[in-house]
Every structure is written in structure tokens, then in C-alpha cells.
Amino acid sequence: MKPSLRTKLDSLARRLEELNRLLSAENAARDMGEFRKLSREHAELSSVVELYGRYQQAERDAADASEMAADPSMKGFAGEELKIAQATMQEIEAEVQAALLPRDPNDDRNIFLEVRAGTGGDESGLFAGDLFRMYTRYAERQGWQVELISESPSELGGFKEVVARIAGQGAYSRLKFESGGHRVQRVPETETQGRIHTSACTVAVLPEADAVSEVVLNPAELRVDTYRASGAGGQHVNKTDSAIRITHLPTGIVVECQDSRSQHKNRERALSVLAARIKDKQEKELAAKTASTRKSLIGSGDRSERIRTYNFPQGRVTDHRINLTLYKIERIMDGELDDVVNALAAEHTAEQLAQLAEKTA
């Protein structure tokens, strides 16, 4: 282990001891905001310091094995113990480096999921519905909550556009690489000659913003329109002006919400989505200014970028960013996304480690 890495880990271990004292102090619970902040930092450091402790134990095991090797009768056993200890040290050092990579501050946030039909007419709308079901099934498997914000059904089923809020631990960290263009190749139900058609949808995954502290919404810059909801929704539809459309004048961003009977609740939800979209726009503009010349292996996340193809005749799903192909399309469309999500996360970590190695070389 490099001296610089060891020095950093020693510093983190001392900080963890300090946090233990602060959190156990009698007045620790008086300021709940500060208490939560310290608790989050404690949780983040604990796993890293635990890894460091295991590394130090492996170091001691290696030192003991080296001492035993001086005894001819123990040389064979000591050699095996030394190999095991050294392999453990290498493995833990890699884990430590991954754990110390810059953490996305949005990873623990809830998300807004937006799915929009693209090229392909009615088939694109059906595919949008399939994608939305795939993500909601995945959310259910994770124990997350899905709250429909707005929907615009297509004529033959599916959606022209659908927006939902997904609330759950690590929702953004698991789904943040889903933003982009999704393409489907299959024989549509309306196709009488059995020809394969290609259609596309776009997916956007936005971290939920703290509208109060992160995005300031000036009422003078908002145009709020009310209208009667359309589509499925019960007896209240077309009877009350409960649906809300909010336009952010400086950016031209438009958000609609019509899912609730309450105009107040629809307004509240629409403002949350608006804050998330503005935050997303601000972060993308900042990233464009400070972007590295080396593009991430998992892509830019631009929603116009084609990231994945779902080929039903061949039963495969291919993620073009990491050249991953899985032949289990039915299970994936039913929400079994872990193989895809884990592969994308692993590739992202590998890219970060490669960039870190370049900087420290």
C-alpha cells in the first residue's frame, strides 16, 4: 500500500474515533440536523476504516508468517500462510481504493423517472409502456415506492409520456445509468406480415431536488395553468380544474401533473418535478464546462444517446456502452435488472479507478 494511501486511511480512522466521541456526547441529540450529518459521515467512514483494519490484520499475519519461515520445520506452512495474507492484502487494497472514489452526492436520493415514446408510432408508445412496467417491477423488487405523477396514454396502449416518482434507499445510485435512448426490435401486434420493426423511447432519471435549499423557484418566473384532467382517473376527471401545468419562464421547462384530485397536491408534485429538471439542467451545464476530455465508458447519459437495444426475436438485451449482451429478455422486461445495473456500476468504478491511476502515475 502506498504511503499516501496509508496516511489518508490513518486520518480517516482518527476522524471515525472523533465521530464516535461526538455522537456519544450528552448534547449530541440537541441539534438533530448536526446529529444526522455526523451520523451520515460515521456510516460512510465505518466501512472504509473496517477494510483498513482487515488490511492491517493481514499485514500482521504476513509478518508472523515471515517469522515462522525462519524455522525449517515450519517453512512450508509459513509459505502458504504468507501467500494467503499477501493475496488478502491485494484484494482489500483494491476494495479500499474503490471505497475512496469520489461519491456521487445524489446516490441516496429518490428519483423522477420519465419515459417518452420516440420514433416508431404506436409501437413506440407500447414500448414506452413496457419500459415503464420494467422499471416499476424493478422498484417493487427493491421495496421502493412508485408514485405516478403524470401520464399521456397512447391510442393503442402504453404511453406517449409517463412520469413517476420512485422513493427508496439508493434509487438514484441504482438507476442513474438508465438515462438515454432505448431501442426495441420486434414484430408489432399490428403487423400482419410478420416483419420486424424498430422503435425507440427515451428515458430520463432525475435525482429529486431539495426545492428549498438547492433550487430557488421564483414565483414571478412561473406561469401556472389549471385545466381539467383527461384520460383514466375516476369520476373527478373532466369535472374539476385539478390538473396543473407549470412553465418555468427562464428555461422554458414545462411540467404537468394531473394524477391527484387535489389541485394543491398536483401543484406540489409539479413543483418537485420542476425543481428536479432545473437541477438536472444546471448540473449538465456545469458538467459540460468542466468535463474531462476522456469520456466515461458508460456514456454521457445524454437522453438522445442510444444506450440499449431489446431484440425480442433473438431474446437478447444489449447495452452498447459496455458491450454487454444478455439472453434473457423476458426476465429483464419483468424487472430483473440487477445483472445490467451491477455491470454498469462495476464498469463505472473501473473507469474511475483507471482515471485515478493516471493522475497518481
Image (cartoon, helix red, strand yellow):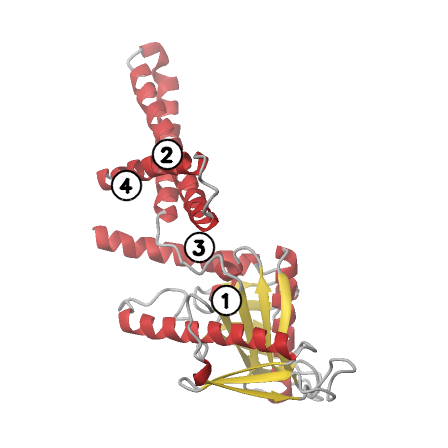
| Residue highlighted by disc 2 | 17
On residue 346, the disc is 3
The image shows residue 144 at horizontal and vertical percentages of 62, 59
- Label of residue 8 in the image: 4
Residue type, mark 1 in image: Glu
Image depth: mark 1 or mark 4 in front = 1
Whole-number angstrom distance, CA of label 2 to CA of label 1: 33 Å
Dot 2 falls on a residue whose secondary structure is helix
Q: Nearer the viewer, mark 3 or mark 2?
A: 2
Residue for point 43% across, 35% down? 25
- Mark 4 or 3, closer to the camera: 4
Q: Quadrant of residue 140?
A: bottom right
Q: Earlier in the sequence, mark 3 or mark 1?
A: 1
Alpha-carbon distance for marks 4 and 3? Answer: 24 Å
Q: Which residue is mark 1?
A: 208
Answer yes or no: is residue 254 visible: yes
